[in-house]
Amino acid sequence: MNHTAKMLRDNALKGKTIVVTGGGSGLGKAMTRYFLELGANVAISSRNLEKLQNTAKELEQETGGKCLAVQCDVRHYNEVEAMLKTVLETFGKVDVLLNNAAGNFISPTERLSANAFDTIIDIVLKGTKNCTLAFGKHWIDTNQEHSKVLNIVTTYAWTGSGYVVPSAAAKAGVLAMTRSLAVEWAKYGMQFNAIAPGPFPTKGAWDRLLPGNLKDKFDMAKKVPLNRVGEHQELANLAAYLVSDFSSYINGEVITIDGGEWLKGAGEFNILEDIPQEMWNQLEAMIRANKNK
């Protein structure tokens, strides 16, 4: 068995309808593919309808499943409501909302305009709020139980991070929303969980975050104790489990999948791994000598 193998049994998501925002490319596309392989109907949304339609056609041909492309700018509540209506007209119900749509770029904060800051906040935090509120109200109004919301956050949602301050602030808000609604809306039969991925290279996101030759200069694998970046199927496996019935007792949790990256950065003395063995021998000898004085 290798770590890129598919985890759940066939038809584990059969009969479920899942909406994936930002599902046209990258990690959203990878998760959508696996949901379809497991028997779910999936609706994918983003602002780029042509990309969505191409992705939906490709994934249907690959999996034999049903994938619906719905154009939606999650920053606008009326578009989210229209997207939900289209999904309901097509599939009759929605069981899972996966808030994956995001925006990010690296920049010293003092270089950001107010509009640039707002763009990230609006997509990540406001967009997640819009979708969660629209879908949640629908589930409450229709007395639908066993509904799930899965949010994609990041490890710096709780640590913060320089040079991605709008994203850090927005993702921290999504994290707080996840935990808050996990308690408040559990009485309506809803579950809220989140995934905090580490480095999972995607062309779109990594080109924005590490443009040009920065990807070569800043090798993300070197920040990870396991000395590699994540494979898309690994994230898809975790997401599929969290939207399946097998996770019915998990609520309000944020699961980190980063190979130990953030723990390595958080440990005050983890930089000592750069010390060669010869120097450790010298340090040990010095300590022993001092003890014997």
Image (spheres, grey):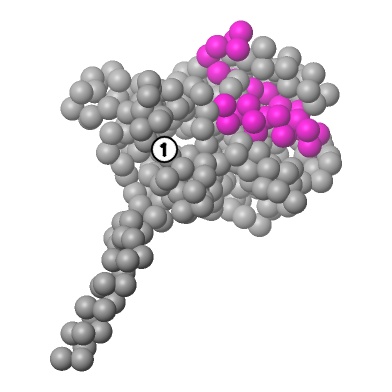
**Left or right of residue 267, residue 245 in this image:** right
Sort mark 1 into few (<14), some (14-19) or many (20+) by Cα contacts within 10 Å. Answer: few
Is residue 205 found left or right of 68 in the rendered image? left
The residue drawn where x is 36% and y is 65% is 277
Q: Quadrant of residue 276?
A: bottom left
Q: Which residue is mark 1?
A: 219
Residue 51, how many percent across, how many down? 60, 12
As drawn, the residue found furthest toward the left would be 293
Q: Is residue 131 left or right of residue 58?
A: left
- Residue extending furthest toward the top: 50
Was residue 283 drawn as part of the magenta stretch in this picture? no
**Amino acid beneath label 1:** Asp
Residue at image position (23%, 29%) is 108
- Residue 14 is situated, as x and y percent measured from the top left of the image, at 82, 37
User: Looking at the figure, which quarter contains the C terminus?
Assistant: bottom left
Q: Is residue 118 above or below residue 183?
A: above
Q: In the image, what residue occupies the spot 52% across and 45% down?
A: 228
Where residue 68 appears, as percent x and y from the top left, is 71, 18
Asked which secondary structure carries label 1, the reply is loop
Q: Is residue 29 magenta?
A: yes
Q: Is residue 25 visible?
A: yes
Classify 120 as above or below 146. Answer: above
From the viewer's perspective, tell me whether residue 116 is left or right of residue 19: left
Residue 112, located in which quarter of the rendered image? top left
Q: Position of residue 111 (x, y in %)?
A: 20, 23
**What residue is rendered at 28% in x and 34% in y?**
163
Q: Is residue 28 above or below residue 245?
A: above
Q: Which residues are magenta?
A: 26-51
In this orientation, which residue lies closer to the viewer: 3 or 246? 3
Is residue 93 visible in the rendered image? The answer is no
